[in-house]
Image: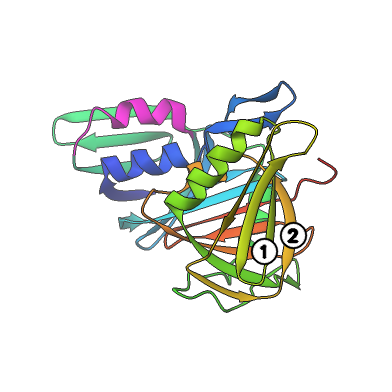
Amino acid sequence: MIFTTDSKELQNALDKIQVKGKHLTTNGFSNSSIGSLFWAELKDNTLSIWNGDATFIVNITLEVNGEKDGNFIADAKELTPFLKSFTGEIKINVGDVVSVTQENKDANIPKVAIHSGFEAINRVRTLLSHVTYEANPQTMFSFNKKPFEGAFTLNMDKFKNTIKSCELAKTGVYKLNYDEGVSTFSSGNNTSSKYSENVTPVFNSGESATVEFSGPLYSFFDNDQLLNFYVKDEFPILIVANDRLLLKAPTVNG
């Protein structure tokens, strides 16, 4: 597997693919991530990078200059520090190791044999292979043969600020209620800390839906992106941007 790409773009993708931030874990509501291992596949000039598990899947697509197709698993925590030593265009050559080269610079890291979430990743990438980014989301894509019922678009900055305010309730669980063209995000309850905010989408279509989720979903996206949300009652939430997508299972009974 061989391709050339911009070092900074790859760094950013490998950082985002970990979805760092405040997660609801067995240790409570604390800073964490979904892990630093990733699975990457090159087809022609498209590099598709995946991470996740049975409840949370993310994918970023980069346009690169491909020379030889293939796939590999590696650890972003090992590769990223080396990428910071490079500026501009770099060549990635994956053989027995993952090699990064540029003129008089050369760095290697070992490949990883197994990604614990690969079975889920492989299943989801097949089930979502028909999903594309739409400027105005009107197509109700399906997941596991069941269509989403509502769709709306939010500016990433607005989504981020709203969820960061919800994080102050410290429950780690967020309710999204999409109804009559308004998206309401909330966290907490009336007997403890609570925050709620109504957000008017840039665009909306479809039917009403309510779903609860957890995790700092906003940290996966870039600040200037428009995000298309696809929702259905008590169903996974799908968020699609121009170069990436996220699928998160609903949180049931908190």
Is residue 72 visible in the rendered image? The answer is: no
Q: Secondary structure at mark 1?
A: strand
Q: Place residue 188 in its image quadrant.
A: top right
Query: Which residue is depicted at the point 27% across and 49% down?
Result: 4
Question: Quadrant location of the C terminus?
Answer: top right
Q: Which residue is mark 1?
A: 178
Is residue 150 visible in the rendered image? The answer is: yes
Q: Secondary structure at mark 2?
A: strand
Q: Which residue, as the protein is rendered here, is positioned at the far right?
A: 253
Query: Mark 1 Cα within 10 Å, few/some/many (few <14, many 20+)?
Result: many
Query: Which residue is depicted at the point 56% across and 68% down?
Result: 152
Q: Which residue, as the protein is rendered here, is positioned at the far front?
A: 190
Left or right of 144, for residue 31: left
Q: Nearer the viewer, residue 226 or 80?
A: 226
Query: Which percent across, then down, holds residue 55?
Result: 71, 45
Query: Mark 2 Cα within 10 Å, few/some/many (few <14, many 20+)?
Result: some
Q: Nearer the viewer, residue 182 or 244?
A: 182
Query: Which residue is depicted at the point 67% across and 46% down?
Result: 186
Earlier-in-chain disc, 1 versus 2: 1
Q: Nearer the viewer, residue 83 or 207?
A: 207
Q: Which residue is mark 2?
A: 210
Q: Which residues are magenta?
A: 75-87
